[in-house]
Image: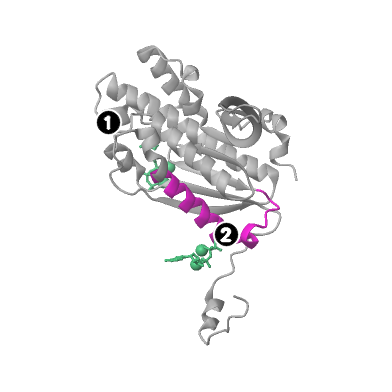
């Protein structure tokens, strides 16, 4: 390829914009499902939280982490996922368009590829799309605050959605009536409605709904069975083999407080 002669058309390459990410910054790529309000309706997602959809999102994010380079962690909720590339990454010479397009296309193709593993014989009715963006964070604190912002968003939306769907599904309010009822209410009011009208303690709702999903690299022991033939025997034998692999493991914990970062200091370490 180096031997290939340059054509007179080659100059058009100079029209490409330089989108190199600033050195030393954490590179965050966030994707979000396009019009998933409609997608959820058309595919009969259970409300407020469809577990199949949440687990499919996480499977896609694990695929992105495993297939691409230099991702140190990911955080997801609803129809979005954020991926953090290490601040010293030099993948594709730190070109923002490469980070963004590889993340989004790998995620979208995985969503279609793995759909049937989570939705079984429920058909995928049309090809879903995702938008993407790249954001640079120059300090560890900025990055932590970014992730805290997404987790706070998860909490606020989930508290609202939990009460909203209780009012619709259990009290028979129309969506407009439920919306009116919640207009201007504070978190405390919503907790109170859940407790007094539906006997629900919000703090006992599943962590995956309240906190979203954090993906971090962890060493895990994988036990597989292998068929081997020993030299002196004629029959094949099944043996258990344990090997250590590094996997993107899901957690549903708080990442706003200091505890998470104290427990996993290697995430932000060089
Ligand atoms: P946009 O294209 O602007 O992102 P959108 O319709 O996707 O539009 P979002 O703000 O991204 O709007 O909201 C995503 C919507 O997808 C939620 O409001 C919710 O209705 C639905 N949704 C996503 N994941 C789930 C899930 N696991 N269970 C139930 N509903 C979900
Ligand atoms: P990169 O990730 O850098 O793009 P690449 O392997 O995709 O790596 P390209 O320069 O994009 O490299 O080249 C695409 C390659 O895919 C071609 O060299 C060719 O081997 C193969 N390829 C693509 N389309 C076809 C096709 N229709 N028939 C046969 N081979 C193809
Ligand atoms: Mg090519
Ligand atoms: Mg949106
Ligand atoms: Mg969306
Ligand atoms: Mg969204
Ligand atoms: Mg190519």
Q: Does residue 22 lie above or below 36 as drawn?
A: below
Q: How is the image coloured?
A: one colour
What residue occupies the far right of the structure in this picture?
270
Percent x, y for residue 203? 50, 19
Q: Does residue 16 lie above or below 109 as drawn?
A: below
Residue located at (55% from left, 38% from top): 75
Percent x, y for residue 192? 43, 17
The residue to which callout 2 is attached is 96
Element carrying mark 1: helix
- Dot placed on the residue nearer the N-terminal end, 2 or 1: 2
The residue nearer to you, when weighing 49 against 166, is 49
Residue located at (46% from left, 15% from top): 201
Residue located at (28% from left, 44% from top): 125
The residue nearer to you, when weighing 135 against 8, is 8
Q: Could you tell me what secondary structure mostly forms the magenta stretch? A: helix
Number of disc labels:
2
CB of mark 2 near ligand 2 (< 8 Å): no
Percent x, y for residue 195? 41, 14
Q: Is residue 265 left or right of residue 229?
A: right
* Quadrant of the image occupied by residue 151: top right
Mark 1 Cα-neighbour bin, 10 Å: few <14, some 14–19, many ≥20: some
**Of the two numbered discs 2 and 1 in the rendering, the one whose residue sits closer to the viewer:** 2
The residue to which callout 1 is attached is 175
The image's mark for residue 2 is none
Q: Does residue 125 lie above or below 206 as drawn?
A: below
Q: Which residues are magenta?
A: 86-112
């Amino acid at each position: 390829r180096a031997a290939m002669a340059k054509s007179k058309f080659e100059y058009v390459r100079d029209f490409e914009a330089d989108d190199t990410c600033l050195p030393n910054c954490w590179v965050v790529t966030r994707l979000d499902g396009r019009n998933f309000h409609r997608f959820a309706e058309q595919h009969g997602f259970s409300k407020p939280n469809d577990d199949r959809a949440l687990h499919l999102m996480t499977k896609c994010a694990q695929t992105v982490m495993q297939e691409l380079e230099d991702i140190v962690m990911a955080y997801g909720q609803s129809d979005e996922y954020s991926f953090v590339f290490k601040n010293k990454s030099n993948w594709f010479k730190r070109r923002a368009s490469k980070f963004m397009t590889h993340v989004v296309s790998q995620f979208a193709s995985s969503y279609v590829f793995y759909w049937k593993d989570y939705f079984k014989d429920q058909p995928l009715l049309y090809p879903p799309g995702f938008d993407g963006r790249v954001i640079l964070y120059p300090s560890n604190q900025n990055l932590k605050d970014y992730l805290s912002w997404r987790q706070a968003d998860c909490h606020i939306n989930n508290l609202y959605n939990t009460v909203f769907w209780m009012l619709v599904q259990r009290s028979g309010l129309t969506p407009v009536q439920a919306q009116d009822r919640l207009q201007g209410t504070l978190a405390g009011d919503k907790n109170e409605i859940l407790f007094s009208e539906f006997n629900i303690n919000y703090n006992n709702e599943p962590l995956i709904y309240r906190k979203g999903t954090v993906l971090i690299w962890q060493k895990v022991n994988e036990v597989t069975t292998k068929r081997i033939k020993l030299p002196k025997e004629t029959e094949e034998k099944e043996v258990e083999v344990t090997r250590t692999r590094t996997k993107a493991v899901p957690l549903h914990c708080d990442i706003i407080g200091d505890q998470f970062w104290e427990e996993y200091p290697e995430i932000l370490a060089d």
